[in-house]
Amino acid sequence: MRLVLNGERTLFKNVGLVARFDKRAAMKLAEDLAKYASSKGLDVYIEDTLANKMSTKENSIPLEEMKTDFIITIGGDGTVLRTCVSIPKPEPPILAVNMGVRGFLTEVEPKQALTAVDKCLRKDFTIEKCTKISTTADEIKLPDALNEALIIADEPAKLLYTQILKDKKPILNSQADGLMVSTQTGSTGYSLSAGGPVLDPSVNAFVLTSVCALSVFRSIVFPADSSLTIEIIRPKKILVVIDGQHRQIVSSKLPRITVTRSKYETSFIRFRENFYNRLKSRLLFKGV
Amino acid sequence: MRLVLNGERTLFKNVGLVARFDKRAAMKLAEDLAKYASSKGLDVYIEDTLANKMSTKENSIPLEEMKTDFIITIGGDGTVLRTCVSIPKPEPPILAVNMGVRGFLTEVEPKQALTAVDKCLRKDFTIEKCTKISTTADEIKLPDALNEALIIADEPAKLLYTQILKDKKPILNSQADGLMVSTQTGSTGYSLSAGGPVLDPSVNAFVLTSVCALSVFRSIVFPADSSLTIEIIRPKKILVVIDGQHRQIVSSKLPRITVTRSKYETSFIRFRENFYNRLKSRLLFKGV
Amino acid sequence: MRLVLNGERTLFKNVGLVARFDKRAAMKLAEDLAKYASSKGLDVYIEDTLANKMSTKENSIPLEEMKTDFIITIGGDGTVLRTCVSIPKPEPPILAVNMGVRGFLTEVEPKQALTAVDKCLRKDFTIEKCTKISTTADEIKLPDALNEALIIADEPAKLLYTQILKDKKPILNSQADGLMVSTQTGSTGYSLSAGGPVLDPSVNAFVLTSVCALSVFRSIVFPADSSLTIEIIRPKKILVVIDGQHRQIVSSKLPRITVTRSKYETSFIRFRENFYNRLKSRLLFKGV
Amino acid sequence: MRLVLNGERTLFKNVGLVARFDKRAAMKLAEDLAKYASSKGLDVYIEDTLANKMSTKENSIPLEEMKTDFIITIGGDGTVLRTCVSIPKPEPPILAVNMGVRGFLTEVEPKQALTAVDKCLRKDFTIEKCTKISTTADEIKLPDALNEALIIADEPAKLLYTQILKDKKPILNSQADGLMVSTQTGSTGYSLSAGGPVLDPSVNAFVLTSVCALSVFRSIVFPADSSLTIEIIRPKKILVVIDGQHRQIVSSKLPRITVTRSKYETSFIRFRENFYNRLKSRLLFKGV
């Protein structure tokens, strides 16, 4: 993570809007934000699947084409991840409004959403740049991951026999239900649930974490500029999941997944520095 | 960790010898190595407490003055750590012969010791440079740590209430029996026993690991160029242990331990690249 | 686990044979054992799918009807579990020959197989009785589990939101990829991989272990005579896996899985007491 | 844990009072409770060290002689444990008022204390009976433990090399900073901090948990009616800590600690069934 001051940025002239569909309040807030942003002179673009469900006359656009000056997401971490997986690269900065079960990546609560737009317009924010992971599965280039690339068997609770290579040299074998390579950002997500450590946002590293390893297998922290390859000895058909959003079946004699640092980053609009506050509220740390 | 080729080095002209005293075989090997090194034209310096117990006419010298071209240690990780804590900085490179329960840091078995000296003389080795940690406890500068700086209460199984600061900013509180900051090298030692992740030797990071935290507290991986401060809210009297070797009682109103990267490194003489092989034999990984 | 002396047992007059199909050596040993058992006067029954692949004139019989005096399995833990899931209740005792990656449940190596038959015929063994778990998913009675009943989402790496009830009283909620209830026998299997404790074979208890819990969720050890119910709040469609062998999709408004002690047990033929020896070789314990 | 109805009990005629000394509010509440209990016709006995610091004319009595009908403790878990370690056996039931950092064992908050006395007088409560552990260190009988018996080296962060015996048969070796045997009650205390599972209060079991094991060592759950012996191979001088309160140095050629179920129990006065509610507030479980 790098924090970038915003002084030299040009003014925002347009905005993209993404929201979860399954929550009426999120749809309502999307409408309010669309109106408010328009009234402030911004051109508003709404994700097309969302636009279809809204009573709005704003521009409708697929996520893959949302090349706006910034994007507002309304939802939890799932909505943020779904957005990051699909938007054009380099990614516009994201202002994430929390309307989800897990809002670890989000910045503001719904009632602060309009004020947050004001702050964006007067450039009163910092940009948090988050490293992403680039994954290649056999010959297939997968979308970049903000959180993690997870490798599992095609059916649940089935062992993967793998060999792990660092910079093309074999280092270890593993027998586990799954293996994931996680970014600093992702270290507080699924990797943490699987037993991994927290990576401070400023450490230049990835973490390899296993899911239900047959024998003991501790998480290993690698430099972010190394390449990690997972060769799947068996089974022949496996599943790669990017950020819990994008699923890719890989089927070959020796499926080979390679993970490196992406040249792109995800940019979050932040109003305060708050990684450790968010971490505490993830309920894993309780102090004096 | 950085691997350094050895081409430009000057020839070794003298050697220091360190061995554990409690094992007859270690003493015997020390005598054999002293004779062999002499016969090869090296000036031999023997750690004084060891020299007193040996039938030898070699030079006797305290560890603190062992400014030789290289040092041979005979023992396990404890002997290596005891040596690194005391020898003058910058540290001469260490050839570690394994005669211990745990020989994770060592390079050769006893029967290869003489051959290893030959290789050293013909410059047939690489140098593994390992980051060390510099610790200040209140105003006291402690010896650099190759593995970890551990903070615990003065009596066993007693809780420490602490505040953790990164680069002087408070980030988290913790209630635990102990807290340690561990290097990459130390990540496979005590930190691993306490539940920490493995740091690949090439990652530029430290790891903060707690011992028996009251609530859950996952290990956190920090950049090696950050400074970590632990303020001990209670009790007022605590113990800092460097590499399990050097113990420092600290007693003040708010004991404050600060840890940064040392400007010195420990250098190991290595004949092959073998971190992950050593890790497997630490019995935590069992593959296909 | 109860160990039962064998003095009062009547002599074995027939035997069932089960083997993995995917290993030529296992098929070969099955043929050898069939011949040997016949030559000793035993009636031999061979699992039908296996019989089809063997050049044998022995009786062919489905696992579900294998009501023989005892059963020999040739393979790893998977073969043992597959057998236990299907054979008629109460179960004939099992002599498990190890020809698998994991042979934690097995008793003898292939070269000891014929000798082991001799010992069985002269009643020179003890019976290890292992508690099994009875699982009801909505109205469906599933096969008893020797190791564990696992509840997961129908697709990989997807969260289950559940409520846990003990003896019909709600005790905790959980958000995790999966939840399993494991027997003493199963505590060294999948539950251990997911972070659970070891249950000594003589403790009268089950253990509830989660897979990748969102927040921290430690394993909980319950009396074996309690009933545990998992209500799945979402999703509406889940998968229950018995011993990694039997998979049951459950789909309803509030899928409800109830687990109690089965009235049946699995009986293993044992020649020595060796739980902790097997545990050590599971590579989790390394002593002085 | 067994819950016992209270119908047949005779009325309480006297009460013992214990409080922490380091908190003014605790002393004040002790005075209020003493007056209130007197006014209700109870004979009040106050722990002597406490009585010395109070302006009271009540009877002063050492903990070791506090054979009252029931005892009120004012403080956190430490105060409860200190009381249980010292009071005469069989133990009078304890009403624990929470005035501590950790009040996991306590039942009522300070403002409910007087009402709780009323309920006690009209027999409106249940008794929670908690199993205790009896520990013998070499020939020395130690006080019974409500939570755990912990074995550690005499100096901090030093390895114990031990052999573990169940019912006098060796089962495993261990290399760790410490080993503890914990009751069901203690499973949510220090054992949990060291990585152990939760034991449901109704399971008839103990759990063996290690502290910072050199290699991996999972907690093992044993029947409460087994005996566990820890033989300490080295060092020769170790420390046994009962409930964090009573410390016993043991020094011999092969220190041997044996742990069995005590014939005594600790009895808590409870007004509602609340183990899992207390567990949730221990912050380890966070549900939907």
Image: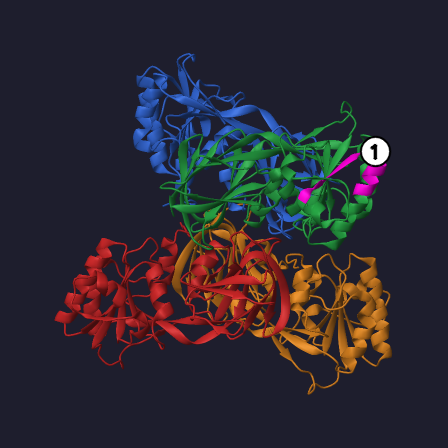
Chain colours: A orange, B red, C blue, D green
- Vertical arrangement, residue D185 with respect to residue A230, above or below: above
Which is more toward the observer, B56 or C193? Answer: B56
In the foreground, D116 or D128: D116
Q: What residue span does the magenta drawing correspond to?
A: D34-48
Label 1 element class: loop
Locate residue C64 relative to residue D264 in the image: left or right: left
* Closer to us: A255 or B283: B283
Q: Circle 1 is placed at which residue position?
A: D41
The spot of residue D280 in percent (x, y) is 70, 47
Locate residue B68 relative to residue A220 in the image: left or right. left
**In the rendered image, which quarter is residue A193 located in?**
bottom right
Residue A161 x/y as whole percent: 45, 50
Residue at x 21% of width, y 62% of height: B30
Dot 1 falls on which chain? D
Q: Tell me the quarter of the picture where residue D191 sits.
A: top right
Question: Is D43 included in the stretch rendered in magenta?
Answer: yes
- Outermost residue on the left side: it is B39
In the image, residue C110 lies in the stretch drawn in magenta: no
Q: Residues within 10 Å of mark 1 (few under 14, many from 20)?
A: few
Extreme bottom residue here? A8
Amino acid type of disc 1? Gly
